[in-house]
Amino acid sequence: MNDTATIIPMTESGAEAGFDVKRLRADFPILDQEVYGKPLVYLDNAASAQKPRAVIDAMSGVAETCYSNVHRGVHRLSQLATDAFEGARRKTARFINAKSDNEIIFTRGATEAINLVAASYGRTFLKAGDEIILSHMEHHSNIVPWQMLRAEKGIEIKVVPIDDDGNFEMAAFLDLLSAKTKLVAVTHISNALGSVVPVKQVIEAAHDRGALVLIDGCQAVPHMSVDVQDLDADFYAFSGHKLYGPTGIGVLYGKEDVLNGMPPYQGGGEMIASVSFEKTTFKKAPHRFEAGTPAIIEAIGLGAAIDYISGVGFAGIAAHERDLLTYATERLREFNDIRLIGTAREKAGIVSFVMDGVHAHDVGTIVDREGIAIRVGHHCAEPVMQRYGVTATARASFGLYNTRAEVDKFVDALQSVKELFG
Amino acid sequence: MIADDLRDLYQEVILDHGKNPRNFRHPEDVNRFAVGNNPMCGDRLTVFLKVDDAGIIQDVAFEGAGCAISVASASMMTQILKGKTAEQAEKIFENFHAMCTEDDREMIHEEGIDPDDIDRLKVLSGVKGFPIRVKCATLAWHTMQAAMKGEQEISTE
């Protein structure tokens, strides 16, 4: 599935032995409900994933037992809260195999993580004429910060094309790389297409030309094991809420020496070593980049989500989601009026499509009445829509708790769309 | 089994206008136009108007891409507004907007406006049950209003 994931042979039922989706579903309280009188089928995981009981309990547990501000108090609760908060950082570091906990910066989300790099690294080290390379399938959050930097510094933005199936065009990327390239910022997995980008190869080639690489890993970390040291990524950004964790928390991984060479992103409490009106000195990473009181409860919730997903195991998750993707793709191909957008060689559990004569928004409304939650629109990736000549797609994206039976319900609902639109 | 509220939203008339929109063209001699965006779903419509010196809408047309609801509403709007004054257009929109958003509110007949024109819009009342789709139904109207005011780009976000 990617550079690092292990592919496990599937059993006849499509799932890896030991992966019990029925048991896992029971871990997610929200799934046990009806929407418009129909059992909820949640297929909008690429937008945000649901939370297991373990995450909900960890967050309310902190609030009920040991909540306090962190890194500040001498009192008992502050010590407990700090231990829990820093414990979440340690779990996050292990989760992506960072060399040190100091390489994990907590942010509000992946968007802030990318903006941090653009504002701190970009504004300090990039100058007019320098080039940044993006891919055509970036989320707006990995386009707009660089355009803002371009407006300020006069840098150039180059875009790696994608082919008709949604594959990252490696040869074109290699052609774009030059001595002018200072940074490559690409997604690991496209949120709109599901395409997996061969990021290890991208990073190796970029490093050969002396450029740093930022990977947007939002869609990757919930679905496959990521090893930032093996990838040799300089920056790796992801959000908590797509990883079955809370909103308001995200992660920027950065190599320690790179981070310590960067100026602070915001000023305030927590990030300083000492302050006087004449001179202020800053702490090292990660605290240098965490001005103000952080999202304490959310960080601990993210730690619990990481424990949960690690407990389930990526071998099982990857095999299960691959089975759902294969099955859903087969079933959608039964429709002669559905065009799949995104059929890359390597894909994550995302199916994006358009239906002849029916706008995606209408598809979304009709399947919603069957209790099925999907995303319709441009998925914050308008350049992808332009690439395929569509204004919007309907997208079903799978999580570890989805089932083949839910795919069947989705396909039945699409039959209703056809029936209604004739 | 398709739910009744869906049948109500996607009535034959709406599906017909959605598939075969009327006045779907770019007239050459327009003197007002505006682009309407619904960023949430990517709908984008351009409304063209030709308003004479007396303030009467001589021609109204639109182009663009959108869902069945936004295209049908735009299509019906172009049929209704032709020959109306700017004030009448504004009144019909207010009337229509209230029907889409307020509980138990239907289209209300108004003096000087053909009741048939008012009644035609009742077919879109199904959006009441789908609050998120109200923006679709009103996109073309907001765009028409912006064009009348001389604003060339609006967003319904």
Image (cartoon, helix red, strand yellow):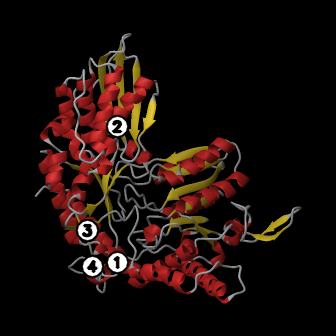
Task: Give the chain letter at badge 4.
Answer: A
Give the label on residue B139, or none. Answer: 2
- Marks 3 and 4 sit apart, C-alpha to C-alpha, by 22 Å
Circles 2, 3 touching at the beta carbon (< 8 Å): no
Q: Nearer the viewer, mark 2 or mark 4?
A: 2
The residue wearing badge 4 is A15
Q: Nearer the viewer, mark 1 or mark 2?
A: 2
- Marks 4 and 1 sit apart, C-alpha to C-alpha, by 19 Å
SS for dot 1: loop
Q: Do labels 3 and 4 share a chain?
A: yes
Pick the front one: A400 or B18: B18
Give the label on residue A363, or none. Answer: none
Give the label on residue A28, or none. Answer: 1
The residue wearing badge 3 is A40
Q: Which of marks 4 and 1 is nearer the N terminus?
A: 4
Q: Nearer the viewer, mark 3 or mark 4?
A: 3
Q: Position of residue A309 (x, y in %)?
A: 42, 79
Q: Are marks 2 and 3 on the same chain?
A: no
- Residue at 42%, 29% in the rendered image: B146
Pick the front one: B3 or B42: B3
Question: Amino acid type of disc 1?
Answer: Phe
- Marks 1 and 2 sit apart, C-alpha to C-alpha, by 38 Å
Locate residue A241 relative to residue A420 in the image: left or right: right
- Residue at 34%, 79% in the rendered image: A8
- Residue at 71%, 47% in the rendered image: A127
Question: Amino acid type of disc 2?
Answer: Leu
